[in-house]
Amino acid sequence: MRSVQLSPDSWWHPANKVHRFLALLLMCFLCFGSYFCYDTPGALADNFKGDSHLNTSQFALLYSIYSWPNVILCFIGGYLIDSIGGESLQVAVNSYVVLWFKGKELNMVFGLQLSFSRFGSTVNFWVMEPIYRWVANYYGGYERLGVALFIASFTCVGSLICGLILGWMDYRAEKMLGRHEEQSDAEPFRLLDILHFKRVFWLVSVICVAYYLAIFPFIALGKLFFERKFDFSPQDANTVNSMVYLLSAALSPFFGILIDKTGRNVMWVIISTITTIGSHFLLAFTFVNPYVGVMSLGISYSLLASGLWPLVALIVPKNQLGTAYGICQAVQNLGLATVLILAGVIVDKYGYLMLEMFFLGCLFISLIAAVLIYIVDSANNGVLNMSPSMRESMTDTSECRDETANLLEHEDSSDQEVTDSRDRPDPKEPQRDFTQSQSDRIRSRYIAQLLPNTNIPDRQ
Amino acid sequence: MFSSSIISYVIAIIAFLLHTSAYGQDRTINAEINPGCNNCSLESTLVYIRAEGQTDTIHQIYEYNDLGDKGRMDEKSWIHSQSLKRVTWELKEQIITEKEAMVRLHGTMHHNRSRDIIDVKLDLLPYKDYATELPHLIHTANSTLVDISLVNLTTSRYYNSSRFALHLVLVSTDPATDTMHNVMRKSLDDEHTPGVFEIIEIKTPASLSSEMGGFVQFRPVGYTQHERNVGSSTIAHVSDFNRTSLPDWSTLKTFYKGFDEGNLLVQDMVVCFGEPGDGFYKRYNYTAWSYTIGYGAPPMEGFSLFVIVIISVGLGVPVLLALSGVLYAVRRKYRHNPPTRLINED
């Protein structure tokens, strides 16, 4: 290893702005590549069916097989992070983000990352069809599908290269700046401990499943709905359909900041669930231009995601966080995988009006769960629905009840974690940096969850 | 210029001799195949159905034979009309009971070695209900379900984006100067025909003004595979009406022999199938379409009990629950001091 003689002014020094933004670029492309690759079969759904001689239900089955591993891996991955400190891609990326950026930059960085991931999915829908057609000039039958998928998989190789470079950069920065990893002295987490998770956590996971069921299966089956009910051309229908992704790519960073500033997560979750119900109501029971309904759906979805996922970090002790997020994402994937098939059956048997009724039912369940969280929480000091300044003053009191204790713990650990090589917290603004680091810590955890798998065929 | 089409002909008759004032009641039907013709070959099939009601009798007559005529679908598209003169018709299936009269015919066209089949099914069920098969049209004692499938038709060598269309000739005893009416209704409910929100009715002037005339009712949807579902559905487009005259050598000509042809309202229309990017007819080599043809007021579809129950339970119960939850929270807030008061927050 080269000895560390660089001046901190050199752009090649890890503390330099240029260097850090190079790292940012790599992080963004890491996300872009993997999401691009995940969504390829969705973008090529029709060609997939044609070239592999699959009918719609076989294709749906293929797709759900494809999402089953997510159900198990999320859970196992989360448990591994808690027990032996292993890292999944997203958690790894997020800890890189927290290590390399902090303070004001962090929100923007998270925003960019999320946008790039969503952008990866969207660009995939734009370019895979032309790529497939180009490949079709040289290959025929199942070969052209294979070659198109092979080309798409190169973005994953690109992600891997970005990841390797980033890993090396991180290793180098660690050496040069003498940064060391936080040593976890928390007691080991055992699998049976999930039985002792609080009721509120299970209510949050109900929302994780029920709410998302009304978003992703809708997008999966939405294209035909817009074509038939609103007389949109296939292309226009695709554009409306992609609005939810685009809006969430554009708005998530801003809603993240909003929630950071205002707190009151439970209230935001309730509000966004109600507006989502309103959007589905517009789509189901009126002929109002679907852009109105879909755009408010996209806005509500982004707001909910920003409010919901940090809740888990406030409820569950830090040494169980990985498992908790793992459970949330696993049940969500389980729900999506099964309901995708169910939604197809509902459309075939009872039509889109009944499908919308099903979505509304899911949303009402999630609304009830949110209201229950509010009730349980307000019986328990109301930590979840506090503004940041209230949470902050909570930490001043010595009284440590259940959730308050968790909160304190997170803040302590996050403070340690973010206090890395570079600038120490400004002593003039200790409080501000304190809350900032707390929210950074939480965001690094939940940002991974903002990006649920969207491996859903776009038409059934 | 690539959206060319080949027009096949299926001639529908909208003409009823007797007027009726009682609609919708269940009837007993008498049906015979080729009545009074002892040496008819299976090549020409005539179904005679006598439906007896309380106050009226309706005669519906269909004959399937090789019929041919010309039509235009679109000025811009290349059209090749395919004569059905060489089609041989074969009776494949029949159910003639008091509760149902159904015949299924196969018209076979011999194109070199391929077997092109036009499958036509007529079904009269003398009571009001939704058909068992998609698009679940409503049949009544006054209307007959017609189902047409174009199976494995040979497409023209000169076109690589062929679609098939059906050319319908509509005839009524209304004044020749009048016109047929195309009435489209759009609803929020696609329960009966998933993915289809419209229903189209072609009404004769008499049907429109006094509900005493013929109608054709259908959903603007066709199916591109034998297995009918939302995924295999495609859009059925309906053209405007064109004035025309009774085709020569046709059943219609025979049927309206006793009328002055100058006083008959004769119009035609074209129904074509497909939507952009669906891979044209050759993708599945199959197109199916259904309509009902009847007399009187076209039946109206409604919300089924199932849907009403789901909507009222689905909307009512959660709203009540959510409201009581909010009430609980509000009451709680006023009964106890909120936790925020415990903290010094200015």
Image (cartoon, coloured by chain):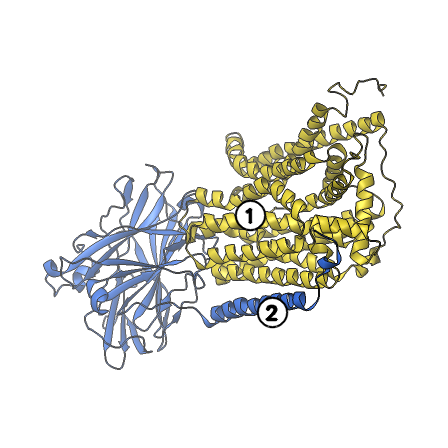
Q: Label 1: chain? A: A
- Rendered colour, chain A: yellow
Residue A219 image point, x, y percent: 54, 49
* Residue at the extreme front: B346
Which one is in front, B341 or A453? B341
Disc 2 crowd, CA 10 A, few/some/many (<14, 14-19, 20+):
few
Q: Please state which amino acid type lies under the numbered disc 1.
A: Ile
User: In the figure, residue B299 lies in which quadrant?
Assistant: bottom left
- The x, y position of residue A177, in whole percent, is 83, 27
Q: Counting other residues with Cα less than 10 Å from the Cα at mark 1, is it few (<14), some (14-19), or many (20 or more)?
A: many
- Taking the spot 23% from the left edge, 78% from the top edge, the residue there is B56
Q: Which mark is residue A148?
A: none
Compared across the picture, whether A139 is left or right of A431 comes to left
* Quarter holding residue A113: top right
Q: Is residue B92 left or right of residue A411?
A: left
Separation of residues labelled 2 and 1 (CA atoms): 27 Å
Residue B231 seen from this side: yes
Q: Which disc is residue B324 wearing?
A: 2
Residue found 62% across the figure and 53% down from its top: A268
Determine whether the residue tagged by mark 1 lies in a helix, strand or loop: helix
Quadrant into which the N terminus of chain B falls:
top left
Q: Which residue is mark 1?
A: A299
